[in-house]
Amino acid sequence: MTETCTVCKRKPPVYFRKYSGEKLCKKCFCESIEEKVRATIAKYEMLEFNDKTMIAVSGGKDSLTLLRILHKIEQEFPKAEICAVTIDEGIKGYRDEAVKLAEQAYAELDIEYTVLSFKELYGYTLDEIAEIARKRGKGLTPCAYCGVLRRRAMNIAAKKANATKLATAHTLDDEAQTVLLNLFHGDVWRIARVKPVTDEVHGGLVRRIKPLCEVLERETALYAYFKKIKFQSVPCPYAGTALRNDIRSMLNRMEEKHPGIKYTVFRSAEKIREALEESLEKGELRTCEVCGEPTVGRICKVCEVLEELRINVE
Amino acid sequence: MTETCTVCKRKPPVYFRKYSGEKLCKKCFCESIEEKVRATIAKYEMLEFNDKTMIAVSGGKDSLTLLRILHKIEQEFPKAEICAVTIDEGIKGYRDEAVKLAEQAYAELDIEYTVLSFKELYGYTLDEIAEIARKRGKGLTPCAYCGVLRRRAMNIAAKKANATKLATAHTLDDEAQTVLLNLFHGDVWRIARVKPVTDEVHGGLVRRIKPLCEVLERETALYAYFKKIKFQSVPCPYAGTALRNDIRSMLNRMEEKHPGIKYTVFRSAEKIREALEESLEKGELRTCEVCGEPTVGRICKVCEVLEELRINVE
């Protein structure tokens, strides 16, 4: 007797989902991912029927998978719209290919999009910023600069496109890693900020959603593979922090031995967040005196960073 | 030029404390551990000047180190008293040696002590309980039974000796492991229970303190080695849970690469606990209808476990 898919009971299985015990054929696997994303969106009330959602697409497997799935879901909601943005940070030999892959996907799915570069927005590419910081011998890591500037760039793009939501492709792996990273850094209050959908805190801040936050990264990769999505597989030359990399491999090892553990970490963080939110007062956001974007202080982090870079260049 | 101890600047260092950068000679290292324990006791207000503290001694390096250090500290407080208890769980080929080592230490330091066995208290040795559970093919793991019954045994011993505090030798490693274990199990509310000193919640429950909770296990081992403390090094034949063992090795690897990370995890848990405690109402403890010991329900966990075992034996 040949084995068949746990769901359709007809086709041969191609994937064993350890944490659930299911053996799935290609079609049922892909449908299960789409269903999971639908369920996540519903559970966290990520989208209204008439939202215009901008999807942040880097050109990697996660974001191209998200684009494909949200494009499919959007067709079920006539009043909903999607569009996309690709941020070109200016990383030589890395970003060019990814932008091309993203544009191919936009053309194929007929999606309205923008490409926004650090250079045009801020006057510097990330490579230039990294070089300035390196020469000074102090300042943030390239990844820290990139994080601050990329989040802002996405928000600017979303507002320009009149988008009401901004979707990023953070997976369950990213979320579980971030929880442990914050715990290992002692940044407990940050656990309260890692959430599937951000609160509406300021008119100038488009609410961010993470529809893949309950999907394992290995499963977005498999989805992309089955759907023949062409994605960039070269990793970014700015390698990320040592601690996050260690946490990533540790969590992968743990998930291998204790299937479902990434999801449990994610759920634990939700419970911690609920408790933290009760005891934290919600910080009101102000408007940056320099650029007018939302900020916790008088001057926003982006303007601070840019000012610092400028002083150093002059 | 030969290198000297960071503290006394005279003797040659024998230990490099990675997380602080100190290089310590034998004497300064041992003093630093004793000082740390004093500081922990003060910070968490673990002891009053006139407490009678019962120390739970298994015969391993951690508990014999704790016994030695608390014995030293006690001499500075004329109204304070210490005594000790060793629980004999009834683990063949393992516990006998440990009991002997503990008794040697008590004699050497002239400490009042009790040895209390599962057999006399509950009618079964842990070996017998494990065998019953194995035959039934269900029930708790030996370690889970042991945890429930040992905690109760310690409380009974402490009350008999009129002790006002019960000190256990949990190290920073144990505490950091437990935090992650609870997170990986999704038992977030339990993080609120892992604390250096328990609240006074019920007259029948002697408050427990963990004076080694800020000391690395490798440092209690080194202290025991320098002080020529004879301790049992054979591990318990009931090996603990797979998940805790994985977390232990993971944390050891992480501490090696990122010195201080165990302490950061411990501190993160304290912040989470504060938030959880605010949002949790404090549960009142009741009195078990069978044995009269403190319990959250009508019947305590110990009586539940014993009843289950009895049914099975009959």
Image (spheres, coloured by chain):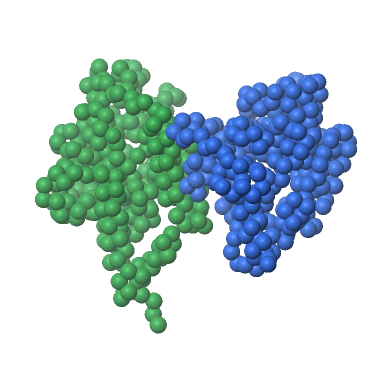
Chain colours: A green, B blue
Please indicate whether residue B115 sits to the left or right of residue A92 in the image. right
Which residue appears farthest toward the left when viewing the image? A78
Which residue appears farthest toward the bottom when viewing the image? A1
Residue A231 percent coordinates (x, y): 29, 53
Residue A195 visible, this angle: yes
Please indicate whether residue A1 sits to the left or right of residue A67 in the image. right
- Up/down of B134 relative to B221, above or below: below
Residue B222 visible, this angle: no
Image quarter for residue A9? bottom left
Q: Pick whichever, B214 or A305, lies toward us.
A: B214
Please indicate whether residue A201 sits to the left or right of residue A133 in the image. left
Q: Residue at x 47, y 34 (%)?
A: B281
Q: Residue at x 14, y 36 (%)?
A: A162
Total marks placed: 0
Residue A308 percent coordinates (x, y): 35, 20
Please indicate whether residue A35 sits to the left or right of residue A164 in the image. right
Q: Which quadrant does the C terminus of chain B fall into?
A: bottom right
Q: Which quadrant does the N terminus of chain B fall into?
A: top right
Q: Residue at x 34, y 34 (%)?
A: A147
Image quarter for residue B253? top right
Image quarter for residue A239? top left
Residue A4 percent coordinates (x, y): 36, 75
Residue B45 percent coordinates (x, y): 64, 24
Q: Residue at x 73, y 21 (%)?
A: B49
Q: Pick whichever, A113 or B70, lies toward us.
A: B70
- Up/down of A299 relative to B226, above or below: above
- Up/down of B228 relative to B138, above or below: above
